[in-house]
Amino acid sequence: MTNRFSPVANMSVWAVLLMCVLWGEGVHSARAQSPSAAPDKVVVLTFDDSVKSHFTVVRPILKKYGFQATFFITEGFDFADNKTDYMTWEEIAKLHQDGFEIGNHTRDHLAVTAENLDRLEEQVRAINARCREHGVPQPVSFAYPGNRFVLEALPILKKLGIQFARRGGAPEYDYKTGGGSAYEPGFDHPLLIPTAGDARPDWSLDDFIKAVSMAELGSIAVLQFHGVPDRAHPWVHTAPEQFEAYMKYLAVNDYHVIAVRDLHKYIDAARPPRDPMGVIKDRQQALAKHRGRENFRRPADEKELRYWLENMVWRHGFSPAEIRQATGLSREEVGAALKRWDIRRETRPPRDENAPLLVLPYPGGRHPRIGFLEGAIRPQRETKFSVFPPWSSGEYFVVDVPEAIWVVIENKRNLLYLAHTHIPTLWDKKGASLEPLEWRRGAAGQLSIERVLPNKVAFGAKIRPGQDAVYMEMWLKNGSSHMLSGMRVQNCVMLKAAPEFAAATNENKILQPPYAACKSTDGRRWVITAWTNCQRAWAIRLARVCTATRNSPIARPEKRGGCEVGFPFMRVTISRRNCAASTPPAGATKAVSNCSIRETKQNTHGGKKLMIESNATLYARLGGYDAIAAVADNLISRLTADAQLGRFWRHRGDDGLQREKQLLIDFLCASAGGPLFYTGRDMSMTHRGMGISADDWRIFIGHVRATLEQFEVPATEKEEVIGFIETTKAEIVEE
Ligand SMILES: [Zn+2]
């Protein structure tokens, strides 16, 4: 059975993000232990190949400046016999005693290639054994000899207790230049840490400065040196006076100089990138296209600059480095602007306790994800907004609406839109780029956005903050010449910035379409998302909850279709909170704030079930399911018997009527806040093309009134039911 709709029909998907504030007494959970973003000017010094001058020249200079460093030890070359050019193990042990890190560089300086893989373990263990003999702890850092690596080495190194492995500047940069990339924690695999600069004899101080100045905006510059001087390997030699000048530069300019092992502060070891080559490929693509990899949006004018600075500092708590990442402004520009308007954490205007939830566009810059960062190397900010819960000033949830849209066009599944980068979209494949957009900001905190894709398919989202819930509507219009089918939209809530919710587990989540919910560590608070037409709800261990909604085909414009007839006056509802209406009816707010949530064991499947219960719902006040079923029964009889409205049911069999009655019951229960949710189609889709007139509507409302009166429903409840039904009128009645 195919549904076809007129070209103006919207695929309208609704959702609500509920912030259930179940106040506990003095509940404060500890912030999750997470690595902090690296400040600017963090530099890692590494010295390869056990060169004698590491002990004689480098050691005293580093000690003078109080710098940390890692010495990568190999017994390769003529280490065994040539004690003029290579250190003794006693000297190596002394470096350890001085507080420097000793790393593993394989016994024979063996290149980590596919052919050599079976020898890697033995090579690493041999150096480990020598360390043990000389009272040096087992190395946790490794450097690839000759800077060559293969991905198959990663599990072997991990098994051997290696936590960090440094590579060279290749494959992004040619070995010859000694150039490289800054290490980007979260994007670069900790076993493939790139070298920012590999010192060469012809380097000037400017080359050195170029490498270390990459240590900003969360990136860390890892430097690679060989001998100072290096008589045995002249192609990687550094003159002592040159080295002294480099180190002086670091000291004078307040660089924080650490060893490789100290990177643990900036790395979430539990969440290495799934694709170790992800960021490497991204750099290669950027280099090939001569474009930058930054992802900032420069504010258009002073007014915008001020708006975004307030957003970033007061609400998202961004540091100046994060502001620079989001705006592309210089340190000086950011500093001056913050000063001009006195924007500091301390000058943040307080939020009124009774104000609606605060919803703001997400500024970008700081990555909203935990883990799998390489799946969203440059996340697009225009589909993202943050919801700030009432219980804290620092926490927020980032919602991506939509994160992705898939459709089938001419029997082919296409990724029509993706808010990030790791899968090529239809447009990427065609070489078309989508211009950056921004949320339109409404006066009452609403946000809206609309994007028209190159094939004239348009989609958008509208966000409206409510007291305890955020109402979201996504729509899609087909202006293309193709029938769109198999539509699937994925939306996500990212929990990273709300540590009480960000545990990497599914234990704190309930995934029961249409709900994807997550509870706080103390179990007293919930964030619940629910979407209409929800097909799937899932969680990603990396603190995201996602939902996918599915929709019926949308006809191409010239095919003005008829419409499958459903039961009139239905509307997709999301939860029992009456929140599907474009304006939540009176009482919805109350219902939410009085809600309680509990998990129950579902006997049949053994799974957990989410019960959202409220003592104050209209559902409860109407008398629950049985009462509503009786009301529906009564109403259907009136409608089918009506001289004017009866035409809608004339050709329906008993089965059809039964189904419609059940849908009506579900609809009424759901919209009155009952524990059922409506699984029928969207109101406007259901009724488009039926020719329901304003007069039909008037008669219908008359029957609703009569039914409610027959059941002696009290005036307040009666007006709530009618008030809610009236909100659906615009989508049902055709002019
Ligand atoms: Zn080496």
Image: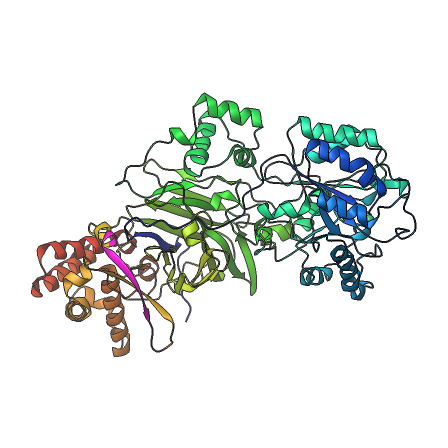
Front residue of this view, candidates 590 and 86: 86
At 43% from the left edge and 27% from the top edge, which residue is drawn?
A: 343
Q: Quadrant of the N terminus?
A: bottom left
Horizontally, is 344 left or right of 628 in the view?
A: right
The answer to whether residue 230 is above or below residue 713 is above
At 74% from the left edge and 49% from the top edge, which residue is drawn?
A: 167
Is residue 599 on the magenta stretch? Answer: yes
Residue 227: image location, x then y, percent: 84, 40
Front residue of this view, candidates 565 and 402: 402
Is residue 505 on the magenta stretch? Answer: no
Residue 37: image location, x then y, percent: 55, 42
Q: Which residues are magenta?
A: 592-604
At 32% from the left edge and 62% from the top edge, which residue is drawn?
A: 686
Horizontally, is 322 left or right of 343 in the view?
A: right
Horizontally, is 664 left or right of 79 in the view?
A: left
At 38% from the left edge and 46% from the top edge, which residue is drawn?
A: 462
Residue 157 visible at all = yes
